[in-house]
Amino acid sequence: MRRKIAYPLATLGMVASSLAVASSPAMAHGYVSSPPSRQAQCAAGSVANCGAIQFEPQSAEAPKGSKECNGGVAAFSELNNNSLPWKATNVGKSATFNWVLTARHRTATWVYYVDGNAIATFNDNNQIPAASVSHTVDLSRFSGRKTVLAVWNIGDTPMAFYNCVDVNIGGTGGGGSTTPTTPPTTAPTRPPATTPTTPPTKAPTTAPTATTAPTSTVPATGKEWAPGVAYKINDVVTYNGVSYKCRQAHQSIRSWEPSIWTLALWLPL
């Protein structure tokens, strides 16, 4: 059975779009875009052999309580595979984790784990979050290469979303890239688009900003949009002959083209 997944889409008053993928019926919701989580690296094409998660990086949804990168979802088992060449981002004594939410839901807590232990919890008191959410987490107790498990616990369902983010704390130990490598020029074959079943909630009137925005790898001069690039607020790109200005700092991936994410991430000029 095919699952319908909602993406933010441009229309001045609301955000809605979709993509169908083969999996169990449920909506997609969000994931850590920077530092790039394992599913972000798969979606950008910097890590191959990722399976279905490359098409739906925001869909690692499972019942609360898991300590696995895939939340225990068998279809996304590649996220647990430590032998894949995951890129680790160099960070200092703290790191800011930036989520992009494709469907916003009442939130209980956001919890971050290292070595199976909770190191930071952010309580949203069952409120609906913004389209992007950022948390700065103290990592001073650790050093070297670590895998941070970031969990978004939904407030009105028994479900949660799981992301593993590989980091080099102190910028040492195992060598890592701050951004995914250049993705392949040919996008992977993906399932056909369908119409959304339920549009996300109303888009925020002002674009939220991350506490620490990624450094853009392109100048704000109207360069052609590309996947695998860290865009910052006010960067200008062109796509299909139209110019767009970045509204939210994010790491671009295939299926996040400006024409799809208008108003959520990009403002047409």
Image (cartoon, helix red, strand yellow):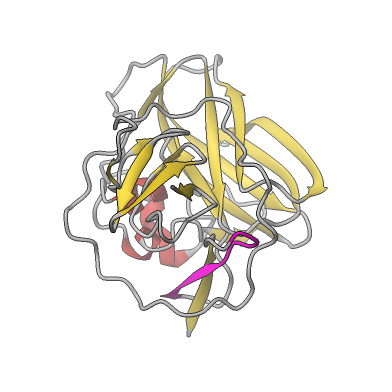
Work out whether residue 37 can be spotted. no
Taking 20 as reference, is 87 left or right? left
Image quarter of residue 11: bottom right
Q: Is residue 232 above or below residue 158?
A: above
Residue 15, magenta (yes or no): yes
Give the residue displayed 55% in from the left and 53% down from the top: 30
Question: Is 36 or 130 nearer to us in this picture?
Answer: 130
Taking 33 as reference, is 8 left or right? right
Q: Residue furthest front?
A: 269
- Numbered-mark total: 0
* Location of residue 9 in the rendering, given as x and y in whole percent from the top left corner: 52, 62
* Location of residue 15 in the rendering, given as x and y in whole percent from the top left corner: 59, 62
Q: Residue furthest right?
A: 125
* Location of residue 87 in the rendering, given as x and y in whole percent from the top left corner: 31, 36
Q: Residue furthest bottom?
A: 1
Give the residue displayed 69% in from the left and 59% down from the top: 202
Residue 54, magenta (yes or no): no
Give the residue displayed 64% in from the left and 64% down from the top: 200
Give the residue displayed 51% in from the left and 79% down from the top: 195
Question: Is 9 or 191 nearer to us in this picture?
Answer: 9
* Location of residue 203 in the rendering, given as x and y in whole percent from the top left corner: 65, 54
Q: Which residues are magenta?
A: 12-22
Work out whether residue 61 can be spotted. yes
Q: Is residue 28 above or below residue 24?
A: above
